[in-house]
Image: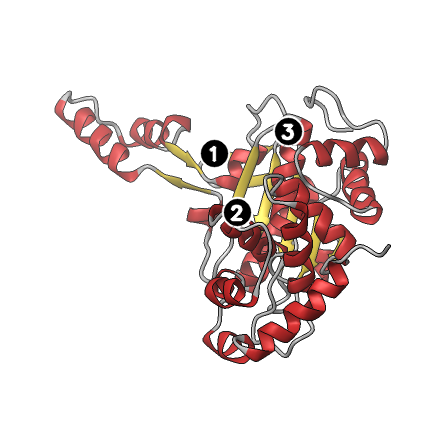
Amino acid sequence: MFRGIDILPESISDLQQRLSDQHYVADRGLATALFLALRLKRPLFLEGEAGVGKTALAAAAASALGTDLIRLQCYEGLDIGHAVYEWDYPRQLLELRILDATHTLDRASAHRELYSEPFLIRRPLLQAIDPARARPAVLLIDEIDRADEEFEGFLLELLAEFQITIPELGTLRATVPPLVILTSNRTREIHDALKRRCLYQWIDYPSFDKELAIVRARAPEASARLAEQVTAMVQELRRADLYKVPGVSETIDWVTALVALDRQSLDPETVDETLGVVLKAREDLALVRGRQAADMLERATVRSTPRA
């Protein structure tokens, strides 16, 4: 088990409850994958469409475990300097000038002084496996599919050994390894060598009942009627031929926006006025607004109406 976390979950049900306390609704399969990642000290690789709760799981897990969340946001061109470490060159230059001014400049000693811990800037990956860390963090490597394939290769050492080699300092190995969660929106295929080092879980769009539970947990100030209608309406939108299908995060945003407008329920006019909160492409807005949105709302209202 992970040392340094005060109280680890005793069971999958316990973990589900802890996540629920952080307003995250995890089904049994997802909670099992996270529980095993903790038990086996293995990274957890999450794939799924954008907005289904992959990133939110890492934040909820960190809070549920009472530890830090360290996030590395991936992007094309991400390199070691932004992901792992870099040297504080302005401070090194200043120190070099001080040594020169005090006539204590010696090449060998200056190199040892300048390339030492005080001048090391720790980026997310090094922060997570820092040997000085007393408690394990949750390391979120977010949207790994946006990074270059070369960066995947660099991660192999980290995920296999929880260590990083810095030429000037040597190999730094985690005293307490982090819980690593990687996410991917599947914009490209991730190499099998990386996936083999991880436990894998696919997160799909939730059912109506699960999404409604998420909305109620994240937007408790919304009326029951509004939460049901918005959830059913988003479920209808996902059946349409959209360029960008809305995720759960857009459902929550829509409910929150409607609460801010003091709406207690949805009507066609309100849908047209606020559709830009949930749909993020001009083509989708043009497709849905008007008669199409009204028909969807009618079906959503029937679906969300409790049966006698």
Q: Which residue is mark 1?
A: 169
Left or right for 56, reference 34 = left
Q: Where is 288 relative to 30, above or below?
A: below
What amino acid is at disc 3?
A: Pro
Q: Amino acid at mark 2?
A: Val
- In the picture provided, is 181 more to the left or to the right than 102? right
Mark 3 to mark 2: distance in Å?
A: 38 Å
For the C terminus, the quadrant is bottom right
**Where residue 254 appears, x then y in whole percent?**
55, 55
Query: Disc number at residue 259?
Result: 2
For label 3, the residue is 136
Q: Where, by quadrant of the figure, is residue 87 drawn? A: top left
- Examine the rendered structure and indicate whether residue 153 appears above or below residue 175: below
SS category of the residue bearing label 2: helix
Residue 194 in view in this figure:
no
Q: Tell me which corner region of the image, top left, top right, bottom left or bottom right, holds residue 163.
A: top right
At x 46%, y 64%, the residue is: 273
Which quarter shows the N terminus? top right
The residues bearing labels 2 and 1 have C-alpha atoms spaced at a distance of 54 Å
Report how many numbered discs are placed on residues in the image.
3
User: Secondary structure beneath disc 3?
Assistant: loop
Between 112 and 142, the one lying in front of the other is: 142
* Tag in front: 3 or 2: 2
